[in-house]
Amino acid sequence: MGLAFLITTDKLQILSERKVLKQHEYAALLDATSILGNAQEERERLLEDAEAHRQQQLKAGYDEGYEKGEREAATRLYADALANARALAAMKQLMAELVTRTVRELVADLPREAIYAKAFARIETLVEHEPVLTVRIAPQQVADLERVLGTMTDGTRRVRVVPDASLSEEALVVETASGVVEAGIDTQLAALHAALVGDEA
């Protein structure tokens, strides 16, 4: 017995060896074809949805990874900048200590009279209109200071030297009616150190 053919609007299908289909068999065949077509369409839709979801997840993962990378890079840059700032501050501190120690050693070799003469020459502009100066100094330095003042004063200003045992050998404090000037070596070196490290105080 030969094969029977069923011609539908869009397909040619090979049926079983029977030449005639019963009505319910034909209806079932049409239903099966329709179900198969719908299943194929649903499969394609699900595949498209899955691909779209996959692309969305890839993009979300990329965006998240990119943002995470940016955050990590910013954190590393900040940490590097902070480390560099600390290293620079430590280097400035070290340089300031080296410079002030060197200056202190140089000053230690100078005669005391030369140091006092230089100090008074520097503060002269600050106290030029003051008729009376009181200079406080360590007792063991009084003689050296008086020798210097004897060569620098012209008699128009009264300078009173007061021995002060509470002061170090390096200290020199000039008091006027307007205020106090600390011109000792320690004070000047502390100011130099602060300027080198960038302290505002």
Image: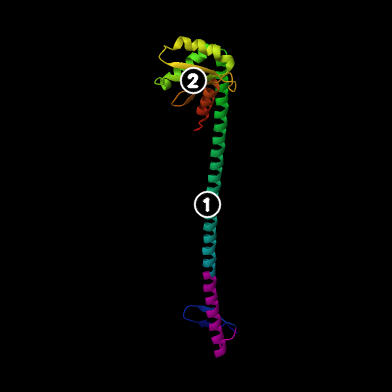
Residue at position x 49%, y 17% in the image: 160
Q: Amino acid at mark 2?
A: Thr
Residue under numbered circle 1: 67
Badge 1 or badge 2: first in the primary sequence: 1
Q: Position of residue 166 (x, y in %)?
A: 59, 23
Q: Quadrant of the N terminus?
A: bottom right
Q: Where's residue 194, x and y in %?
A: 52, 28
Identify the element where label 1 is drawn: helix
What is the magenta range? 17-45
Is label 1 in contact with label 2 (beta carbons under 8 Å)?
Answer: no
User: Residue 122 sits in which quadrant?
Assistant: top left
Nearest the eye: 183 or 41: 183
The answer to which of 150 and 116 lies nearer the viewer is 150
Q: Residues within 10 Å of mark 1 (few under 14, many from 20)?
A: few
Q: Is residue 24 above or below residue 57?
A: below
Residue 157 position within the rendered picture, expressed as x and y whole percent measured from the top left: 42, 16
Location of residue 111 by image quarter: top right
